[in-house]
Amino acid sequence: MEPASHGLRESATFDRATIHAIQRAAETGIYDIRGWGAKRKLPHFDDLLLLGASMSRYPLEGYRERCDTDVVLGTRHAKHPLRLATPVTIAGMSFGALSAQAKEALGRGASEVGTSTTTGDGGMTPEERGHSKHLVYQYLPSRYGMNPDDLRAADAIEVVLGQGAKPGGGGMLLGQKITERVAGMRTLPVGIDQRSACRHPDWTGPDDLAIKILELREITDWEKPVYVKVGATRTYYDVKLAVHAGADVVVVDGMQGGTAATQDVFIEHVGIPTLAALPQAVQALQELGVHREVQLIVSGGIRSGADMAKALALGADAVAIGTAALIALGDNHPKYDAEYRELGSAAGYFDDYQDGRDPAGISTQDEELAARLDPAEAGRRLANFLRVMTMEAQTLARACGKAHLLHLEPEDLVALTIESAAMARVPLAGTNWIPGEGL
Amino acid sequence: MATLIDLAETPVRDLNQALHEAPVASWRVLNPRGAHAVACGIRGNFTVDIEGHVGYYCAGMNQQATVTVHGNAGTGVAENMMSGTVRVRGNASQSAGATAHGGLLVIDGDASARCGISMKGVDIVVGGSVGHMSAFMGQAGRLVVCGDAGDALGDSLYEARIYVRGTVKSLGADCVEKEMSAEHLAELAELLKAAERDEDPADFRRYGSARQLYHFKVDNTTAY
């Protein structure tokens, strides 16, 4: 029987997922740890629309007139900035959270289209370095696997203060994924539930960060761009402080940003949406007079060329994808549905990255499962997806009359809802009204 | 004959570039005057003697070199050192030897808070006392304290070993006193000798992880 057809009504407050969460907590006595990002409905780029050209703007001919996509990151201080062919990069994800094959596939896919990929907590693997033309090396609070030789081998350094899924929280990697290789790289006992620190061990606050960035530049002879990544919370202030500390690039990760293992309560209740954070970041850069001089990368729920085009129009220099990249590799593919169901999930719902039993061979350290992912084939799928994203963004940009993706501007956007108009600071569609403007 | 670099005349950038590019057998650095990032990211079997006080991250990420600070050191001396030896003749500020993977760090005087935080294989010998939260989340290596230790020593410790000669104000979560066996006395004697100390290993007590926080359990709620 379908309960609703018999007049039974589900509680909006205590819906089935909530009831299940209470029952699960009561039975197990431990909070829910999962992967993925925020699953709740949030104001997002879908709530914005682009205004194509008509009488008052001049569109470019699709497929014939050029719409360039190249972007240079790290022009402020670095001797060797990153020159990317498209402004969509691969966000930091660790070997440990992901299989070596998945990391290699990310490197292959990104390199094929001329963009960068990023290490994660736990250090750099040879697979990843070998297959990544542009590799960003994350410098994290745990410093697991942190090695000056890898720092020198990187193309850029990303000082991570937090991530959108859990700003203010450290990482975790559960015991089932701490294999001998992962444990060896992180100097930890095999099989423990690993905690990563939430604060850096040798600096506190923006004044110290300036000295830390100086040290990283000195060690690498001022060659490499230094990024600072923050989870989106007090973004306006964080971006200003990151610039003052000397960042070449600021990365802002909204609350839809993914994770391999975090408490569900953290994922759903801490941080602000990407759409709310981005205009704050741009405002901070503009007020300091460094918009476009210090580049801005935005991540958290980016899924398409439309999301990319809208983020660029709001003032980002590039976007980064994580969850979308994993889906492109094969995550949550329907062909694994039966196996997802055996794990108590289903294709399209699977978020148990923490568990290490990923049938797609991506978020696992199990050798047999990991071997299911062919890095070359998965890398090709990712490259295809990145190309499609880029072409989608070009299509939209040409329609707005732009000869470069970075020429998109806030004036090209309107909002569908009052909330998104207020957050994005663009007018509600069909009006000149920007809620909150002038306050 | 040491190559002389006077930081009153030469920028730190030039010093580090020289140390990275053309290391000779020995260097002498004058007038550091609290400068940051002095002799960081160096690689090679050579010596650097710094005549005065240094700021943050002196000898950071050192590989193989022997660096001696004839003065005090600021925050994060020898942070993330991989190998080699760093010696501070005076006192060291916070986070000395933070996250260091190898080598030997000797501090003749006192070290401040978080000495050996997240240490990953380094050996640290402190002639004086250490501040609170020392060896926090220490993963591997040995911390030897010839004086006293502050609050929350070894909090959330993994497999690093701690030896303290004086008093411990308090132990952090999951850190316990452990038995001192012959093996431990022997390794402590070696560490003291390497640090040119003459304390008697028998006067020390050993601390390590109780390993009760290695897995998330509801019974550990109060510790989280």
Image (cartoon, coloured by chain):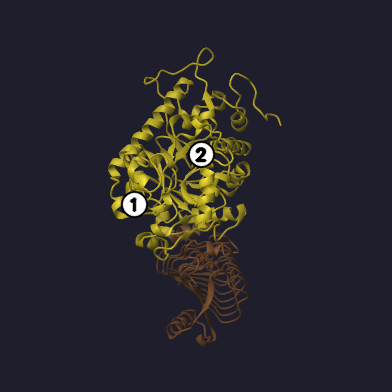
Chain colours: A yellow, B brown
Q: CA distance from mark 1 to mark 2?
A: 26 Å
On screen, residue A35 above or below A425: below
| Whole-percent x, y for residue A126 in the image | 33, 54
Outermost residue, right direction? A439
Q: Secondary structure at mark 2?
A: strand
Visible residue check, residue B23: yes
Q: Nearer the viewer, mark 1 or mark 2?
A: 1
Quarter of image, res A56: top right
Tag 1: amino acid: Ala
Q: Secondary structure at mark 1?
A: helix
Tag 2: amino acid: Val
The chain to which mark 2 is attached is A
Q: Nearer the viewer, residue B111 or A264?
A: A264
Left/right placement of residue A180 relative to residue A400 reads left
Give the mark, 1 or 2, whose residue is nearer the N terminus: 1
Outermost residue, top direction? A55
On screen, residue B32 above or below A217: below
Name the residue: 61% across, 31% down: A419
Q: Residues within 10 Å of mark 2 (few under 14, many from 20)?
A: many
Residue at label 1?
A: A100
Q: Nearer the viewer, residue A202 or A288?
A: A202
| Whole-percent x, y for residue A201 in the image | 54, 61
The chain to which mark 1 is attached is A
Q: Quadrant of the N terminus of chain B?
A: bottom left
Which label belongs to residue A298?
A: 2
Visible residue check, residue A147: no
| Whole-percent x, y for residue A143 in the image | 47, 59
How many numbered callouts?
A: 2
Q: Quadrant of the C terminus of chain B?
A: bottom right
Q: Nearer the viewer, residue B87 or A334?
A: A334
Q: Residues within 10 Å of mark 1 (few under 14, many from 20)?
A: many
On screen, residue A49 above or below A115: above
